[in-house]
Amino acid sequence: MEEKRDVLFGKTLKQLEEVVKKLGLPRFTAAQIADWLYKKEVTSIEEMSNLSRDARGKLAARFDVGLSGPAKVQVSVDGTKKYLFRALNGKFIETAYIPERKRHTLCVSSQVGCKMGCLFCFTAKQGFQGNLSAGEILNQIRSLPESDLLTNIVYMGMGEPFDNLDGVMQSLEILTADFGFAMSPKRITVSTIGIVPAMKVFLEQSTCHLAVSLHSPFEEERRRLMPIEHVYSLNDVLEAIRSFPLGKQRRISFEYIVFKDLNHSPKHVKELARILNGIRCRINLLRFHPVPGTPLNAPDEETLVTFKTALESKGLVTTIRKSRGQDIYAACGLLSTKEQQPG
Amino acid sequence: MKALKQSTIISNLETAPGAYVLSFPRSFAFVPGQVIGIAMKPDEKPRLYSIASGNQEALVRILYTVKPGGKLTPGLARLQAGDVIYTSEPFGGFICGAEKAVWVATGTGIAPFASMFYSGLSVNKVLIHGNRFASGLYFLDDFLQVMGNRYVPSCTREAVEGIYHGRVLKYLSELEQLDPLVKYYLCGSAEMVVDVRDLLIERGVPFENVVAEIFF
Ligand SMILES: Cc1cc2nc3c(=O)[nH]c(=O)nc-3n(C[C@H](O)[C@H](O)[C@H](O)COP(=O)(O)OP(=O)(O)OC[C@H]3O[C@@H](n4cnc5c(N)ncnc54)[C@H](O)[C@@H]3O)c2cc1C
Ligand code: SF4
């Protein structure tokens, strides 16, 4: 039987050192490979020209670089692009590129589908097919035609990043390390619904920003929206954040999707002010965009503005996130694939 | 999570192909529906399991299936009486009181309902449990004896007399009426929870009445 070929892209320097050791190559070859993969952006082993012919031959016998371009792109009238990359079992993952004047944000997926079952999310309806490897996460960044323009990366696409902690942490290491993309952790945000044990590992081992999906300050209400509340309550999430020294650089934000007539009353404002008291944070309000079959509705602009003003009057720094790419279902933070197969 | 506590296994028996019931002495109070973390070493990242026993029983029972290639369950299945495991305090809020409700589970998702059942909370309840094979209808005899026709066993891969043949989703969709005023508790895989929740909402049950726990 033919041995399954491994890929180099997505390996840490330490893992590359193990690779070269196994192949009987000098240790410094690992740093050279990392340089080719993450800085010089080659797509084949043959292009790694400062490696000996022997080294390239040995590598090519076992490994591929492991990059693959998007299978399809949809472009919104506002310039947002939704790329589909091929994943497991004939499924696709989505990556949203959101250009603004100075900021070019990429919203990456961390899993194929998702297991978390949030009521408002279309990804939840697609079931779960598997975790993305670090290489597959990073491929969404590297193989993007606009890769060189990117200023910010957000892990807010398909999947719950902390349900794939190993793949996500490895991808963050490569994004921020000197041997890798050498990107500032201040330009990277990982968004979670609050899987507490994994979130603690992230807070301890990474310095990237954290975004927590809040959506309701009331336990009962949040449970109906997000089953995770039964296992790790918002209270546990906030306690974990409070107990962690965040320093001045690190930003915590709370994502709050506003649903019509559900989670924007004065009672919500009061409770949000109470539970977030003492946490240096920002609240990002997102307008809900209904997904097929959902019992939830979209609020109007006035509701959003009134809610924002009320939160600010309580001293909570609040922004309304502009909806982008609605026409192509690329609403970041609840990336929704209208179609699963590229047509 | 606080430090894990050592517990000595009383039994760890295969109850159906690939499914085990593990028991150890109860040293804590819990609310039926809660989970505990289990690890084989004190410093290992625990996996979560719903308690499947009653809150007054002397032993805690856990129902689990072996995931081939999994980090914990293949090793867990090899443990025997007298071996030790490491467990967390119970936690979680998937809790149901004495009010009328419908419980829907697939696979090991029956565990929290078994705990509620063995804690005397099954009066007023309908329990719908599905699995691939009839052997995976854990605790069937006990449920049948106490709940009679308020217990609906179902399986998808074999036709067995007295057992509904098909998915729980199909069973629910064939019911003429679904009471929109009672709460529906769902537990099991994400796929089942999402599909059943969608069906219930489509059939007029307000989403506030759907309470779900996912074994992710
Ligand atoms: C609230 C809650 C309650 C639960 N209650 C129960 C219960 O009562 N009974 C029960 O049996 N289970 C329960 N679970 C599930 C349980 O926590 C474990 O996830 C399960 O037992 C598998 O553990 P494992 O370590 O053996 O497998 P894991 O190591 O988690 O692997 C599971 C499967 O995924 C595959 N896999 C592992 N890593 C990867 C990867 N990186 N990419 C792709 N695939 C991968 C494995 O090959 C395996 O098939 C519950 C979960 C939750 C969240
Ligand atoms: S909102 Fe995020 S965590 Fe929730 S189901 Fe969708 S992808 Fe998963």
Image: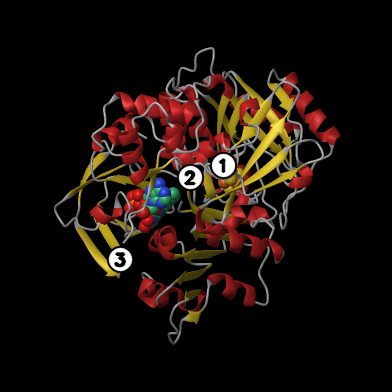
- Residue B18 is labelled as 3
Lateral position of residue A87 relative to residue A329, left or right: left
Asked whether B44 or A155 is in front, the reply is A155
**Residue assigned mark 2:** A132
Instruction: Say whether residue B90 is visible.
Output: no
Q: CA distance from mark 1 to mark 2?
A: 8 Å
Q: CA distance from mark 3 to mark 2?
A: 27 Å
- Of all chains, the one bearing label 3 is B
**Mark 2 neighbour class, 10 Å CA radius: few under 14, some 14 to 19, many 20 or more:** many
Lateral position of residue A134 relative to residue B205, left or right: left
Query: With respect to residue A321, does B68 lie above or below?
Result: below
Q: Position of residue A55 (x, y in %)?
A: 32, 34
Q: CA distance from mark 1 to mark 3?
A: 33 Å
Q: Looking at the rendering, which quadrant does residue A268 occupy? A: top right
Q: Tag 2: residue type?
A: Leu
Disc 3, disc 2: CB below 8 Å? no
- Of all chains, the one bearing label 2 is A
Lateral position of residue A118 relative to residue B147, left or right: right
Q: Looking at the rendering, which quadrant does residue B206 occupy? A: bottom right
Q: How did the renderer colour the structure? A: secondary structure
Query: With respect to residue A156, does B168 lie above or below?
Result: below
